[in-house]
Image: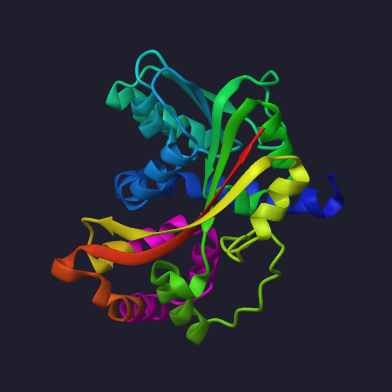
């Protein structure tokens, strides 16, 4: 049920992602490489195949939609949705650039999908569910547009302390900027890191045959520690806002400290972080 708190959270989240869209477009190649294993896992666990009609919710600047477009082939179709106009425009531009034509785009939120009941053979959301103001309502809506017997698949971050890609930055920032304890139920990257929490959401939404998997992989991309810091400091709205309150000297110091902390994850000067996410699937 929508509440005043939900509406405020949605407004704040949309503002942050709107400001972030240009940076996600700028770093799209690295981000695509980083999360390619998660995309492949979603394709597998959602049983996406050639010729299917698939929906990607909160597809951002185009992934995993563009990769799924290749998986469903010319006889299939992928619909990429996102509530941020600028994200949709970036995704459209990349589709044109790569010559991908079996894709369409809609600007909409997860809890208000402009599609008919049972319209899709599979529905996926990669790293978006954590930010839904009302996760149960959003999952219920995604199930509505999923065909009976077919799969809704969600991927979310695992625990922060198991993901140095994340904690390497947050640990350094905490030494320089006071960070209040996060509300574990508020929109945020690790909202569903605790096993069972997203399962409960899917259960309340009415999903059947729910399965939860811990997915371990490597976050890899051909970028240096300095390029990693540039990407992280630009693509995170929360981090950008904190850094803007600091002097250039402090920002430079933090950047240097982050690069030193994560250096072990850059063998041969290329990024390679161990990572853990949670993939939850459920049937209509």
Q: Quadrant of the C terminus?
A: top right
Q: In screen coordinates, is 251 left or right of 178? A: left
x, y percentage for residue 65? 44, 33
x, y percentage for residue 166? 44, 68
- Residue at image position (34%, 81%) is 257
Evaluate whether residue 150 shows in this view: yes
x, y percentage for residue 70? 33, 27
Predominant secondary structure, magenta span: helix
Q: Which residue lies furthest to the front in this view?
A: 209
- Residue at image position (64%, 31%) is 108
Q: Quadrant of residue 267?
A: bottom left
In this picture, which residue range is highlighted in magenta?
230-257
Closer to us: 253 or 212 = 212
Q: In screen coordinates, is 164 left or right of 221? A: right
- Residue at image position (53%, 58%) is 237
Q: In which quarter of the image is residue 209?
A: top right
Evaluate whether residue 229 shows in this view: no
Residue 254: say if magenta.
yes
- Residue at image position (35%, 77%) is 258
Closer to us: 159 or 241 = 159
x, y percentage for residue 228? 31, 63
Q: Residue furthest top?
A: 75
Q: Quadrant of the N terminus?
A: top right
> How many circles with numbers are drawn on the protein?
0
């Amino acid at each position: 049920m929508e509440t005043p708190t939900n509406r405020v959270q949605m407004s704040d989240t949309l503002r942050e992602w709107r400001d972030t869209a240009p940076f996600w477009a700028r770093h799209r190649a690295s981000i695509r490489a980083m999360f390619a294993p998660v995309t492949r896992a979603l394709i597998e666990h959602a049983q996406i195949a050639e010729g299917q009609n698939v929906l990607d919710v909160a597809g951002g600047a185009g992934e995993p939609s563009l990769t799924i477009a290749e998986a469903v082939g010319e006889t299939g179709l992928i619909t990429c949705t996102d509530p941020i106009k600028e994200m949709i425009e970036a995704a459209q531009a990349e589709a044109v650039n790569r010559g991908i034509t079996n894709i369409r785009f809609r600007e909409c939120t997860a809890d208000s999908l402009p599609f008919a009941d049972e319209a899709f053979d599979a529905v996926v959301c990669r790293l978006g569910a954590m930010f839904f103001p009302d996760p149960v309502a959003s999952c219920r809506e995604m199930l509505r547009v999923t065909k009976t017997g077919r799969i809704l698949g969600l991927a979310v971050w695992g625990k922060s302390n198991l993901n140095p890609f994340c904690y390497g930055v947050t640990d350094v920032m905490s030494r320089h900027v006071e960070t209040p304890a996060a509300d574990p139920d508020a929109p945020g990257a690790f909202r569903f890191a605790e096993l069972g929490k997203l399962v409960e959401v899917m259960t309340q939404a009415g999903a059947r045959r729910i399965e939860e998997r811990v997915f371990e992989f490597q976050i890899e991309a051909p970028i240096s520690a300095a390029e990693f810091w540039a990407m992280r400091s630009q693509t995170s709205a929360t981090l950008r806002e904190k850094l803007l309150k600091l002097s250039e000297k402090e920002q430079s110091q933090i950047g240097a400290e982050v690069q030193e902390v994560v250096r072990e994850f850059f063998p041969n000067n290329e990024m390679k972080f161990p990572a853990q996410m949670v993939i939850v699937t459920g049937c209509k």
